[in-house]
Image (spheres, grey):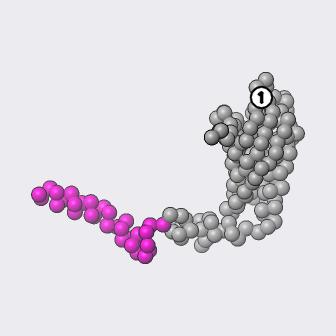
Amino acid sequence: MTKLKLVVVGLAAICLPALTLALGQGESPPASARESGATSGNGMTAIEQTGKVNKAELQAVEKLDDELFAADLNGDAAFFEKNLAADYVRIDAHGEMRNKAETVERYKSGLRKLGALELKKREVRIFGNTAIVTREDNAKGRVGLNGFSGTYRKTLVYMREKNGQWLNFSFQSTKEQPR
């Protein structure tokens, strides 16, 4: 019985600080950063900062994303050379990873060629100097001799450089699976 009491007391000592913090908020532990009040160091949560984004920033990211979309459709390697970050990472729908040089080379060589690309929906969220774009599109094309088509969900991360230019740092694509 004494060992059981020691285990209970030990567990209480471990759990009590967490319980005190949770109860001190007057409700259950928070489910999000907004509820917890966790900040990015600017006195606001990232979610609250998103609501403060000015339209010019949002339009700048949307414009760059539109241009990237068009460059993908047109095979514009020069656009990618200029607008991909030096440490860019691309993960395609098959899980293959490429850096900036490999991505640009696919467009220069004509290895990747789109026949059609239709934007279905897009959401842009900005957190300080970082923008996260999620989009869904229909694409049809080929990489080498292998054709592809379908609906793809994509996540792109853009970051604003010190000179104010937005660059694409990361791209990830997932093909929608039939249900």
x and y, in percent, of residue 94 in the image: 66, 33
x and y, in percent, of residue 170 in the image: 69, 46
Query: How many numbered marks appear?
Result: 1
Instruction: For residue 143, say whether it is visible.
Output: no
The residue singled out by tag 1 in the image is: 147
Quarter placement of the C terminus: top right
Residue at 63 percent of width and 69 percent of height: 48
163 relative to 117, above or below: below
Residue at 50 percent of width and 63 percent of height: 31
Residue at 69 percent of width and 48 percent of height: 155
x and y, in percent, of residue 82 in the image: 83, 45
83 lies left or right of 37: right
x and y, in percent, of residue 42 in the image: 62, 70
Mostly what secondary structure, the magenta segment?
A: helix
Range covered by the magenta-colored residues: 1-30
The answer to which image quadrant residue 11 occupies is: bottom left
Q: Residues within 10 Å of mark 1 (few under 14, many from 20)?
A: few
In-front residue for pair 77/5: 5
7 lies left or right of 71: left
Q: Which residue lies furthest to the left in this view?
A: 1
In-front residue for pair 141/84: 141
Q: What is the three-letter code of the residue carrying label 1? A: Gly
In-front residue for pair 2/98: 2
